[in-house]
Amino acid sequence: MSDKVELKYKNKSYELPVMIGTENDIAMDISRLRAETGLITLDVGYQNTGSTTSSIAYIDGNNGVLRYRGYPIEQLAENATFPETAYLLIYGELPNYEQLANFRRMLTQNALVHEDMLHFFVGIPPMAHPMGILSSMVNALALYDPKYYAEESDSEDFDLMVARLISKVRTIAAFSYKKSIGEPFVYPDAKKSYCSNFLNMMFHSHAKPYDEDPLLEKVLNALLIIHADHEQNCSTSTVRLVGSSKANLYASVCAGINALWGPLHGGANQAAIETLLQIQESGMSIDQVMDRAKDKNDSFKLFGFGHRIYKSYDPRAKVLKNLVAKVFAERNINDPLLDIAYELEQRALNDDYFIERKLYPNVDFYSGILYRAIGIPVNMFTVMFAIGRLPGWIAHWKEMHDDPNFKIGRPRQVYTGLLERSYVPMDERY
Ligand code: SDX
């Protein structure tokens, strides 16, 4: 069904095609706008602008729906593993037994980083932020991959890059943690699953052996799954834009890592916990917190609340809130930050300022509470987000490169600077 939009400008009338998505999301296709009308659009922050079509994730922000390739995230978080979900996002279908076995074998075979890369860790300052380490090391991975350049890579090379990235980011993250606490690196174990391997590399040491923990492994799978994709968010759009110049997959993912680091985006999980810690340590009352969160002149922000797309409860926050309750009950954990989080949520959901602006808890509000329960340090929370989001970044990079109408991304602007003027020699300047 084709629909049209009529545009009237300076006594002329134009028709623009309307595109209707499979979930009936509608878009005015402005691909010919400038050629036909001389007009461009202006949309700061791309709040109303679609950059692409995509079949990877679907979000219904008003009804709190998120699906990966049609599967609700609640079902994937409950039943799937992270490698299975990564395969689904990147290749489009849930893997059969043989495909999953092959994918897992490739992840196992590519878990190590080149021994020469360990020298990079020596030069990194002890308190370096793990997101800075991760982005540096991911960029360095390309230097050890002769076939990294997208132009020459065929599907086998792509599959190998996928396995290398998804497996090695886990190793790099664990090594950066060991480096920060001055302990020797624990190498990946070919006999362990993706999540169990990560937990072992993080928490095993000769002084304190790590015993596999099926509950934490299930929690980590769910955490990584619900972070795995989220359509055209800031970091995924960054990966697409960098990849659109035909920069290689490692460089594009590295750009995504750096975009995710920001506290308005993936860095919000670290900022949210730091806010809860600040409330706990300062003795700030919830009334004071709410007042400061609403005060435009106060830089204090309630991280983990609000979302560009979700104008209802973020379905991922629901999954995480339920997971927190389950794990805390099973392990008899008592974390005062959780009590603060519950109280904050209750107050915000009943506060006119938050209700009017449709501000609800987002994925970053409860994730930090869970990471703390697992023993992940606060400054690694966004690294965990990056490990989870990596399959989504790769899936979007692949979808863009597989598109026969693929184009380099190059937005326009409205110039508001000075009109032409002549050069002023130094002695005539004041
Ligand atoms: C992620 O895009 C994605 O999909 C991202 C993500 C993903 O999976 O990739 O979901 C992950 O980034 C989640 C969001 C994490 N960020 C935070 O929790 C930071 C706190 N939230 C805000 O900074 C904000 O809500 C954003 C950045 C998330 C969304 O910003 P928008 O859509 O540009 O909305 P806005 O900043 O214009 O806010 C609208 C109003 C404003 O008030 P008014 O000017 O209308 O009076 O809501 C207010 C804002 O001041 N507001 C908040 C608030 N968030 C928005 N007020 C207090 N506390 C907050 N947290």
Image (tube, rainbow, N blue to C red):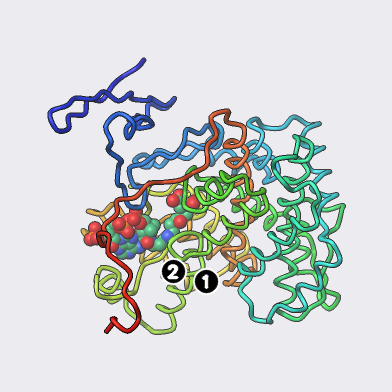
Q: Which mark is residue 339?
A: 2
Task: Please name the amino acid that badge 2 sits on.
Answer: Asp
In the image shown, does 217 or 402 lie closer to the viewer?
402
Circle 2 residues within 10 Å: few <14, some 14–19, many ≥20: few
Q: Look at the image and tell me whether residue 426 can be seen.
A: yes
Q: Quadrant of residue 4?
A: top left
Q: Residue at x 63, y 63 (%)?
A: 331
* Residue 177 at x, y percent in the picture: 70, 72
Q: Which mark is residue 80?
A: none
Mark 1 closeness class: few <14, some 14–19, many ≥20 residues within 10 Å: few
Q: Mark 1 to mark 2: distance in Å?
A: 7 Å
Residue 309 left/right relative to 249: left
The correct choice, above or below, for 415 with respect to 126 in the image is above
**Residue 135: quarter of image:** bottom right
- Which amino acid, by three-letter code, is at mark 1? Asp
Report the side of 239 relative to 154 (left or right). Answer: left
Q: Nearer the viewer, residue 222 or 17?
A: 17
Q: Position of residue 368 (x, y in %)?
A: 53, 64
Marks 1,2: beta carbons within 8 A:
yes
Quick one: quadrant of the C terminus?
A: bottom left
- Is 371 on the left-hand or right-hand side of 102? left
- Relative to residue 100, is residue 210 depicted above or below? below
**Residue that badge 1 annotates:** 335
Tell me the quadrant of the picture where the N terminus can be found.
Answer: top left
Secondary structure category for the residue under label 1: loop
Compared to residue 3, the image places residue 412 above or below, namely below
Q: Quadrant of ligand 1?
A: bottom left
